[in-house]
Image (tube, helix red, strand yellow):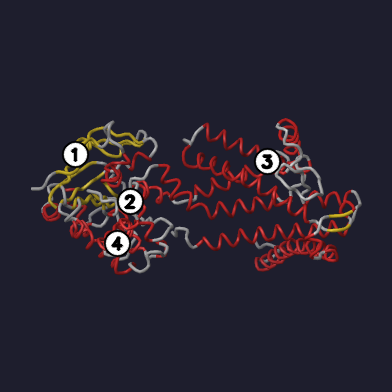
Amino acid sequence: MSEIEIESRNLDLWYGSAQALKKISMAMPEKKVTAIIGPSGCGKSTFIRCINRMNDLVKGCRITGELLFEGADIYGNDMDAVELRKKIGMVFQKPNPFPMSIYDNIAYGPRVHGLRNKEELDRIVEESLKASALWDEVGDLLDQSAVDLSGGQQQRLCIARTLAVKPKVILFDEPCSALDPISTAKIEDLINMLKHDYTIVIVTHNMQQAARVSDHTAFFLLGELVEFGKTKQIFELPDKKSTEDYITGRFG
Amino acid sequence: MTSLISPATSDKAAKVMLWVSASIAILTLLFILGYIVVQGLPVLTLSFLLESPRLSGAEGGILPAIVGTFCLMLVALLSAVPIGIGAAIYLAEYAPVGVVTRIISFGVECLAGIPSIVIGLFGYAFLVIYLGFGFSIISGGLALMFMILPWVVRVSEESLKAVPGGLREGSFALGATKWQTVSRVVLPSAVPSITTGVILGVGKAIGETAVIMFTAGSSLLMPTSFFDPVRALPYHLYILASEGISDPMAYGSSVVLLVMVLVINLAAVAIQRHYGRHHVRN
């Protein structure tokens, strides 16, 4: 049984007066993949964006309850969001490479954290691109604009960019919803490789994807956590009727 | 019930009328350009561009006016661009949406609406007299800065707002601070369109006469410092024509001014083309 890396206890979230998350309690274990599934608007993206405090940027967003990272309160007074995000990286739904070279994209994180040494940066860029299975494709094109890459390559670049900061956790917010099936398969392979070194939380619209890549699955519905457990159990023998209905495609 | 004119006929009629409108617009431009070029061509020689004027501009060239115009633009740009982009960054990235932003935006709008002759008068009272800059490149350039500042703020703000939000999120998610995000990702992404906008603003300012006649002076000598007075090209041609000094010389100056504006606009297009590729798609 592995250690708990992230734990949410009775987490409530409001956008203005609308409650988007209701009493979410779940624990995400270290170096495992936790998938969050559910229909659109169920709060799964909202929840994952709490973990690296991306919701800080949303006006009128209010949170109560506890969200712990390595035992420390993510929303505590002594938690620095900028420091937190170095340890908890995020890959977004739409690939968002910066309009600069491939090299500069990967080096961006280390650079903003103060690294200037060229050799060290070279090494990180190479390592990160290798770890995201992109080195063979772009190793010779580091000076090219990242924007010219294909969608799938852009998304792997965004993963490489996240790895370059050496986080402990990587959050994936529907990372494949803008990609074709072949690119999607590559990202899934990558997630299966990365889980040996990182704790992964992935929000996905695609139930097969959750079944393929995750160890644990959480099913969200209307802002509530309906069911959370081992992926195998959730997909084969769910406790709740609504989980079964969603998984078998009766709604969603 | 059937209409008197068939849809096919009205379709054709509309097409013809729109074509006529478009033609009139193009022909007007071509007529003005053609007329000025034909009138100005006889005096357009290399010495016209490279010599100082003699006999109040009736003979000789217009080099000091060209140099003066460039210097005025330089001062206006060097002052308006940092202030304008700074204000735009504040408005687009930092200021909470609310009363303050609206007041600042409204103020910028109002500044844009002030007639240039009024800005000229203010420049005369404030820069020339009160601050003691006298009739000089500094006074004229700063007065022009008041003219183009709203434009620079507006263009920069729009360009910054057009940068996809995903880029900001991507930067924050890597543990970058707000300023790192703004200065290393958002601003560089917006620079091509800001540059294009600013250059077009210069294209407008370069022909501005009312502002500089009160502030930059009307000296025909070659300036040696930024505190020397100069006569900018549009003012030079105004004086040549209005005081009956020389119509051909006035047209010659016009051609030079038009070419400068044309070059500026082409530069803007070229920059847009060159950097367009780097902009994030989708």
Q: Amino acid at mark 2?
A: Pro
Q: Residues within 10 Å of mark 2 (few under 14, many from 20)?
A: many
SS category of the residue bearing label 4: helix
In whole angstroms, how far apart are the C-alphas of marks 2 and 4? 13 Å
Q: Which mark is residue B142?
A: 3
Please give the residue where the numbered disc 4 appears in the rendered image: A126
User: Is B8 or A227 nearer to us in this picture?
Assistant: A227
Q: State the image quarter where residue A182 is shown.
A: bottom left
SS category of the residue bearing label 1: strand
Q: Amino acid at mark 4?
A: Glu
Q: Residues within 10 Å of mark 1 (few under 14, many from 20)?
A: some
Please give the residue where the numbered disc 1 appears in the rendered image: A25
The answer to whether B191 is drawn above or below residue B273 in the figure is: above
In whole angstroms, how far apart are the C-alphas of marks 1 and 2? 34 Å
Image position, residue B158 (x, y; %): 54, 47
How many numbered discs sit on the rendered protein?
4
Q: Residues within 10 Å of mark 3 (few under 14, many from 20)?
A: many
Using the image, name the chain to which the residue with label 4 belongs: A
SS category of the residue bearing label 2: helix
Please give the residue where the numbered disc 2 appears in the rendered image: A110
Horizontal side of B135 relative to B77 (left or right) equals right
